[in-house]
Amino acid sequence: MSDPAKVRRHAERVRELVASVVRSQIKDPRLGMITITDARITADLRDATVFYTVLGDAVAQADTAAALESAKGLLRSTVGKALGLRHSPTLTFVLDDVQDQVKHIDDLLAAARNADAEVQRIAAQAKYAGEAQPYRVDDETDEADETEEADEATDVEGTPRGGETR
C-alpha cells in the first residue's frame, strides 16, 4: 500500500505527462481539441484513469477516443519512463462529461427560478379566504386585566404594598 500523498503526486504527474505528449508528440488527425482534466491512479500504482474533454460534437469525441486508444502504447511507455516505477501503469481514458452535467444543472436551476417567479406572481395576486385577521382579538378584556393587576399592586390608600410610609 502506497502513501496517499505519493499516489496524488503520481496522478498529477501522469496528468501532466499525458497532456504534454498529446500536445507535442501525437500527430493523429483524429485527435480533436482535447483537454486532459484529471488523472487518478490506484493505490498500487498499476492502473491510471485519465479524464479528458473534447471540444466538439459526438463525432469529434469518438474520433478523439479512437486516437487516444491507438496512442495508448506510446503514452504508457512515456509515463512509465518518467515515473521510474517498476511497472508502468495501464492507462484508461474516460471522456469527462462535466460540461454536459453543468448544462443540465443550469437548465434545472433556470426551471426552478421560473417556477419560483410563477409562485411569487400568483401569491402577489392572492387574497385572504376570510378576514385578514382570522383570530378573535378581545381588546376590552385585555384592558380590564391590566387594570386589575395594577389595583392588586397598590393598597386602598394608593401606596405600594409591602412598603411603610413614615
Image (tube, rainbow, N blue to C red):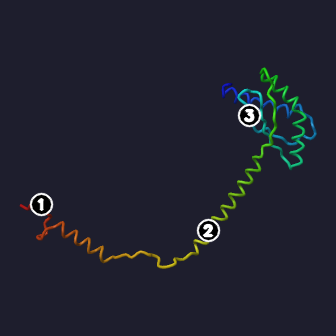
Question: Identity of the amino acid at label 3?
Answer: Arg
Marks 2 and 3: which is nearer the front?
Answer: 3
- In whole angstroms, how far apart are the C-alphas of marks 1 and 3? 83 Å
Q: Quadrant of residue 94?
A: top right
Q: Quadrant of residue 9?
A: top right
Which residue carries the number 3 mark? 40
Looking at numbered disc 2 in the image, what kind of residue is underneath it? Val
Please tell me which residue lies in front, 166 or 11: 11
What is the number of the mark on residue 163? 1
Q: Are marks 1 and 3 in contact (CB under 8 Å)?
A: no
Of tags 1 and 3, the one toward the viewer is: 3
Q: Which residue is mark 2?
A: 119
Labels 1 and 2 touching (C-beta < 8 A): no
Q: Residue, x 56% and y 75% (percent of image)?
A: 126
The reply, left or right, for residue 9 in relation to residue 71 is left
Badge 3: few (under 14), some or many (20 or more) residues near its Cα, within 10 Å?
A: many
